[in-house]
Amino acid sequence: MSSNYGPSSYLKKSSKAETGGSVSEIGESVDKQLEALDQKVADKTDELLQELDKMSNRIDALKSSTHTLVNEPIDQQQ
């Protein structure tokens, strides 16, 4: 399975770019790529934490509804 993300894709891009560049230029390029990757990870982490919070709230609401239903008297009139 191939992915557009991950260390291997960044290494491939950096090896294609500036093969004749100085060590400092290559280092700067790698630093920029790492910063971009760190930002993507931070963004995805925030997104996943928000989703987790929503799911937790849904679970709490379901627990509350279930508790209410369990404790509600049953109407036996027909």
Image (cartoon, rainbow, N blue to C red):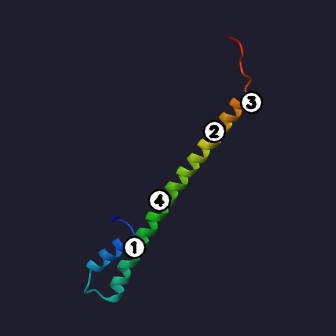
- Label for residue 71? 3
Mark 4 surroundings: few (<14), some (14-19) or many (≥20) residues within 10 A: few
**Residue for badge 2:** 61
Residue flagged by tag 3: what amino acid is it? Asn
**Residue for badge 4:** 44
Count of all numbered marks drawn on residues in the image: 4
Residue flagged by tag 4: what amino acid is it? Lys
Q: Earlier in the sequence, mark 3 or mark 1?
A: 1
Classify 22 as above or below 40.
below
Query: Where is residue 48 drawn, in percent x and y?
Result: 51, 55
Classify 12 as above or below 60.
below
Classify 60 as above or below 33.
above
Q: Earlier in the sequence, mark 3 or mark 2?
A: 2
Q: Give yes or no for contact between labels 4 and 2 (Cβ–Cβ under 8 Å).
A: no
Q: Give yes or no for contact between labels 4 and 3 (Cβ–Cβ under 8 Å).
A: no
For the residues labelled 3 and 2, the Cα–Cα distance comes to 15 Å
Residue in view at x 71 percent, y 18 percent = 75
**Residue for badge 1:** 7
Residue in view at x 68 percent, y 30 percent = 69
Disc 2 element: helix
Mark 1 surroundings: few (<14), some (14-19) or many (≥20) residues within 10 A: few
Classify 28 as above or below 74.
below
Of 63 and 23, nearer the camera is 63
Disc 1 element: helix
Residue flagged by tag 2: what amino acid is it? Ala
Residue in view at x 72 percent, y 21 percent = 74
- Label for residue 69? none
Q: Earlier in the sequence, mark 4 or mark 2?
A: 4
For the residues labelled 4 and 2, the Cα–Cα distance comes to 26 Å
Instruction: Select label 3 or label 1 by which is in front.
Output: 3
